[in-house]
Amino acid sequence: MPYAIWKYDLYPYMLTSKIIEHHSGGLVSVNGYGGFKFKPVQIISDDKGIKLKALIEELRLERRVKIKDLEKEGLKRITSLLEKEE
């Protein structure tokens, strides 16, 4: 079965998973989402779906790392300013 793509409200704003069932009206159910039915933005091949799923995970991890780095840098800057005040 191919993969479905759907919009999501958190970064990277799209998700994908393997279609497990087609329903009337263009709705699908996908693996790992408890049988939830939705109309996908797009349906793609297995090969593309596997690559897209990996890319989405890579982007999510990259974002977490960058946010952590930004938080550390922010704390350093605050600490540095406070030390200068003493």
Image (cartoon, rainbow, N blue to C red):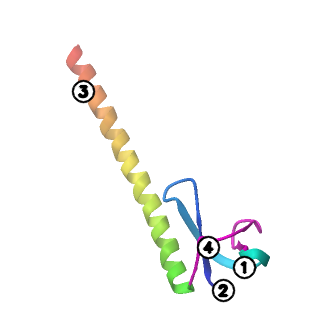
Q: Kindly identify which numbered label has been placed on residue 28.
A: none
Residue where numbered disc 3 is placed: 80
Q: Are marks 3 and 1 in contact (CB under 8 Å)?
A: no
Residue 40 counted in the magenta span: yes
Report how far apart the C-alphas of labels 4 and 3 lie in the structure. 46 Å
Secondary element under disc 2, as helix, strand or loop, is loop
Instruction: Give amino acid for label 2.
Output: Met
- Magenta residues, start to end: 27-44
Report how far apart the C-alphas of labels 4 and 1 lie in the structure. 9 Å
Q: Are marks 4 and 2 in contact (CB under 8 Å)?
A: no
Instruction: Give amino acid for label 1.
Output: Ile
- Compare marks 3 and 2 and give the one earlier in the sequence: 2
Q: Are marks 4 and 1 in contact (CB under 8 Å)?
A: no
Q: Are marks 3 and 2 in contact (CB under 8 Å)?
A: no
* Residue 74, picture quadrant: top left
Mark closer to the observer (3, 1): 1
Q: Kindly identify which numbered label has been placed on residue 17.
A: 4
Secondary element under disc 3, as helix, strand or loop, is helix
Q: Position of residue 85 (x, y in %)?
A: 23, 15
- Compare marks 4 and 3 and give the one earlier in the sequence: 4
| On screen, residue 56 above or below 83 | below
Q: Kindly identify which numbered label has been placed on residue 1.
A: 2
Q: Position of residue 47 (x, y in %)?
A: 52, 85
* Residue 72, picture quadrant: top left
Instruction: Give amino acid for label 4.
Output: Ser
What residue is drawn where x is 24% and y is 23%? Answer: 81
Q: Are marks 1 and 2 in contact (CB under 8 Å)?
A: yes
Question: Where's the C terminus, which quadrant?
Answer: top left
What residue is drawn where x is 49% and y is 65%? Answer: 57
